[in-house]
């Protein structure tokens, strides 16, 4: 008889694990001995002052940088780009192709070898979730900043990646676009994409996050549930950050 438990656990991706991860560039230790486990579901928020190492943390996670020492593991690491076991990333400044909004999304689906008969519907749905139906034939670079960001996110999500990294993706967006982006991220999380969300916006962290990692000077000072973090930030550095002060 099949063992239901092991059958199920085989389908779950491994969590992302950082073990003693450090990154030194030009003799400067920019990431210092980070240990953490990120579960394969939910929204993990990353916070910390400017220059703390949040973007470096994401770049290490994405494999764009190799740690000087330590290891990073997870099922996504050997996945083919653009597949459902892979990782996608959206930055503060979206990187788009010099083509229409529609073509930007179709391009990713083509790469994924999406059957032609499914393409129109998938592109249509993606544009709809990003509220860009009217802009479908607009060249991506003519879109407003917020529209470009929504397109970048729709494109990242169309392959239904295992992990989505958002690095201050709503930093220059108005409240309406921010709301749309948060909704897209929440929908993706609800259908199984792990979201890692870097933000400086405390209210946003509370709205979107399940757990929070607080990074300061390259060190991971705290990793706890959002609820626990805002009751007890766990360090004077995190408290100072929340109060808008420079820690003493
Ligand atoms: N290639 C590099 N060479 C040298 N220093 C670097 C390099 N990349 C990043 N740094 C430094 O590492 C530190 C962390 O940078 P990082 O971009 O991760 O900060 P951050 O937490 O994302 O900040 P912000 O909130 O401003 O985006 C910064 O002091 C930065 O100057
Ligand atoms: Mg950054």
Image (cartoon, grey):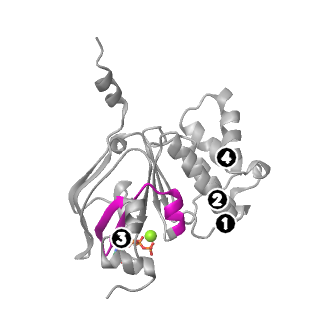
Residue 7 locus on image (x, y percent): 32, 23
Whichever of callouts 3 and 2 sits on the residue coming sooner in the sequence is 2
Residue 40 locus on image (x, y percent): 38, 44
Question: Real-space Cα distance between discs 1 and 3?
Answer: 27 Å
Which residues lie in the magenta part? 203-224
At x 68%, y 40%, the residue is 125
Is label 1 in contact with label 3 (beta carbons under 8 Å)?
Answer: no
- Residue 2, quarter of the rendered image: top left
* Residue picked out by circle 1: 175
Residue 227 locus on image (x, y percent): 42, 60
Is label 2 in contact with label 1 (beta carbons under 8 Å)?
Answer: yes
Give the class, few, some or many, for how many residues have Cα within 10 Å of label 3's Cα (few <14, many ≥20).
Answer: many
Give the class, few, some or many, for how many residues have Cα within 10 Å of label 4's Cα (few <14, many ≥20).
Answer: some
Whichever of callouts 4 and 2 sits on the residue coming sooner in the sequence is 4
Circle 1: element type:
helix
Question: Real-space Cα distance between discs 4 and 1?
Answer: 16 Å
Residue 76 lies in the magenta-colored region: no
For this view, does 180 lie left or right of residue 41?
Answer: right
Residue 77 locus on image (x, y percent): 34, 45
At x 38%, y 81%, the residue is 240
Question: Real-space Cα distance between discs 2 and 1?
Answer: 6 Å
If the picture is divided into quarters, which one holds ligand 1?
bottom left
User: In the figure, 143 relative to 216: above or below?
Assistant: above
Question: Real-space Cα distance between discs 3 and 2?
Answer: 26 Å
Whichever of callouts 4 and 3 sits on the residue coming sooner in the sequence is 4
Question: Real-space Cα distance between discs 4 and 3?
Answer: 35 Å
Circle 3: element type:
loop
Give the class, few, some or many, for how many residues have Cα within 10 Å of label 2's Cα (few <14, many ≥20).
Answer: some
Between residue 130 and residue 243, name the one nearer to us. 243
């Amino acid at each position: 008889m099949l063992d239901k438990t092991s059958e199920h656990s085989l389908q779950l991706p491994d969590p992302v694990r950082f073990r003693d991860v450090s990154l030194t560039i030009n003799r400067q230790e920019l990431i210092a001995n980070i240990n953490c486990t990120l579960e394969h579901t939910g929204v993990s928020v990353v916070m910390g002052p400017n220059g703390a190492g949040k973007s470096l943390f994401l770049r290490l996670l994405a494999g764009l940088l190799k740690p000087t020492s330590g290891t990073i593991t997870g099922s996504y690491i050997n996945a083919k780009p653009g597949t459902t076991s892979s990782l996608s990333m959206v930055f503060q400044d979206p990187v788009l192709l010099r083509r229409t909004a529609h073509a930007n999304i179709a391009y990713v689906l083509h790469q994924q070898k999406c059957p032609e008969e499914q393409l129109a519907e998938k592109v249509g749905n993606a544009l709809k979730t990003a509220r860009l139906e009217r802009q479908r034939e607009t060249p991506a670079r003519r879109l407003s900043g917020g529209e470009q960001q929504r397109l970048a996110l729709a494109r990242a999500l169309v392959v239904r990646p295992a992990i989505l990294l958002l690095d201050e993706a709503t930093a220059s967006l108005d409240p309406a676009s921010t709301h749309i982006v948060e909704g897209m991220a929440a929908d993706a999380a609800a259908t199984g994409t792990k979201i890692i969300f870097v933000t400086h916006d405390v209210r946003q962290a509370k709205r979107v996050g399940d757990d929070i990692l607080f990074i300061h000077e390259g060190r991971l000072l705290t990793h706890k549930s959002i609820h626990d973090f805002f009751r007890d930030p766990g360090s004077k550095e995190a408290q100072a950050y929340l109060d808008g002060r420079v820690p003493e």
